[in-house]
Image (cartoon, rainbow, N blue to C red):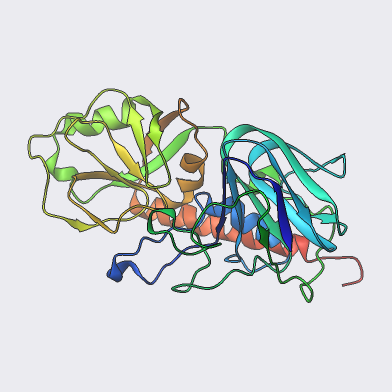
């Protein structure tokens, strides 16, 4: 078990999400920063889609009830295990009874904790992710609270090399704030000046942002055609509601919507956008669909490299 000794304001179970239920109106969900969770899983020898903890909004503590490998990734934090500093993006080992304490989140928005074997909560529609608006998945469909215990199935998990680390050149450029985009399905309906505004403005993430979408503050993008008939949407879509302020749809994005879609964030850059806090700036830079696809392939290759490095234990 992992026992939540002191729950932060936001703590949930997430994995790679529900990728085959959109036709039934169920959002993909899953980790906001899929790269950070996948990297943490790779560092402890898990499949990339294994369930871990998504942590935000403050400090807290949890206790491991048996020896295990774990890794933290994503937001920069001040963290200790039994009083010893815990290195981020690195394979670490905990002894039974030791507590991981996160004092505070220093930079970024979401921290991920992966443990060898993955968290063993029930599968629902092919995923262990928590979908809070629907109150299902994860641990009883809700945020974790102090005193909760979550089982993990690491007894027979492979033993990765302690100290394995994800090098900076294998990570997204979290510090850059540059988000690459391609033109959306309704881009041709906008005046060209709208695209200029979107790509030349330094937007800021609004406080009215959550797992469903990040509202952006800056010059409004004018539209003359209002709401359109509903059509399919996806995480990364940038839609423009009536007030002209763009909204970037995130992991819990609805499956359909009627706001015009001016652009789509490259899937390779969704982790960068996910880690921007309210008040942080973002700048959108246009690329082609082919460039976006190549960037995602590179991201997947980087994750594979992280897993290979972690698996090279001495004597293996």
Q: Is residue 74 above or below residue 29?
A: above
At x 76% / y 42%, what residue is drawn? 101
Q: Where, by quadrant of the figure, is residue 284 drawn?
A: top left
Q: How many marks?
A: 0
Q: Where, by quadrant of the figure, is residue 208 drawn?
A: top left
Name the image quarter holding the N terminus: bottom right
Q: Nearer the viewer, residue 62 or 119?
A: 62
Q: Nearer the viewer, residue 128 or 199?
A: 128
Left or right position of 96 against 232:
right
At x 28% / y 70%, what residue is drawn? 23
Q: Nearer the viewer, residue 44 or 121?
A: 121
At x 85% / y 65%, what residue is drawn? 313
Q: Is residue 302 visible?
A: no
At x 53% / y 67%, what residue is drawn? 128
Rendered location of residue 34, percent (x, y):
53, 54
Residue sticking out furthest to the right:
315
Residue sticking out furthest to the bottom:
156
Q: Is residue 201 above or below residue 109?
A: above
Q: Where, by quadrant of the figure, is residue 29 drawn?
A: bottom left
Q: Is residue 94 above or below residue 1?
A: above
Q: Is residue 85 above or below residue 154?
A: above
Residue sticking out furthest to the left:
225
Rendered location of residue 168, percent (x, y):
68, 43
Rendered location of residue 5, percent (x, y):
73, 48
Rendered location of residue 290, percent (x, y):
37, 55
Q: Is residue 154 visible?
A: yes
Left or right position of 22 against 31:
left
Name the image quarter holding the C terminus: bottom right
Left or right position of 265 against 75:
left
């Amino acid at each position: 078990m992992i026992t939540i000794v002191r729950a932060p304001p936001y703590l949930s179970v997430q994995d790679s999400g529900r990728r085959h239920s959109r036709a039934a109106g169920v959002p993909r969900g899953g980790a906001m920063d899929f790269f950070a969770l996948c990297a943490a899983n790779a560092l402890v020898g898990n499949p990339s889609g294994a369930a871990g903890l998504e942590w935000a909004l403050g400090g807290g503590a949890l206790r491991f009830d048996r020896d295990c490998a774990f890794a933290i990734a994503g937001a920069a934090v001040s963290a200790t295990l039994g009083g010893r500093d815990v290195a981020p993006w690195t394979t670490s080992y905990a002894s039974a009874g030791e507590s991981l304490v996160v004092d505070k989140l220093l930079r970024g928005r979401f921290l991920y904790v992966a443990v060898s074997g993955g968290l063993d909560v029930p599968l629902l529609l092919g995923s262990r992710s928590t979908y809070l608006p629907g109150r299902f998945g994860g641990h009883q469909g809700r945020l974790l609270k102090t005193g909760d215990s979550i089982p993990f199935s690491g007894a027979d998990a492979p033993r990765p090399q302690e100290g394995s680390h994800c090098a900076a050149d294998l990570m997204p450029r979290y510090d850059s704030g540059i988000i690459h985009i391609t033109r959306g399905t309704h881009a041709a309906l906008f005046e060209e000046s709208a695209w200029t505004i979107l790509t030349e403005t330094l937007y800021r993430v609004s406080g009215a942002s959550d797992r469903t979408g990040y509202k952006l503050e800056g010059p409004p993008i004018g539209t003359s055609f209002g709401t359109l008939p509903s059509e399919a949407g996806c995480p990364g879509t940038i839609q423009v509601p009536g007030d002209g302020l763009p909204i970037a749809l995130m992991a819990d994005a609805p499956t359909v919507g009627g706001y015009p879609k001016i652009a789509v964030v490259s899937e390779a850059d969704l982790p960068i956008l996910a880690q921007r806090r309210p008040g942080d700036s973002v700048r959108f830079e246009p690329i082609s669909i082919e460039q976006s696809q190549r960037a995602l392939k590179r991201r997947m290759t980087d994750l594979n490299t992280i897993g290979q490095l972690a698996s090279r234990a001495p004597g293996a």
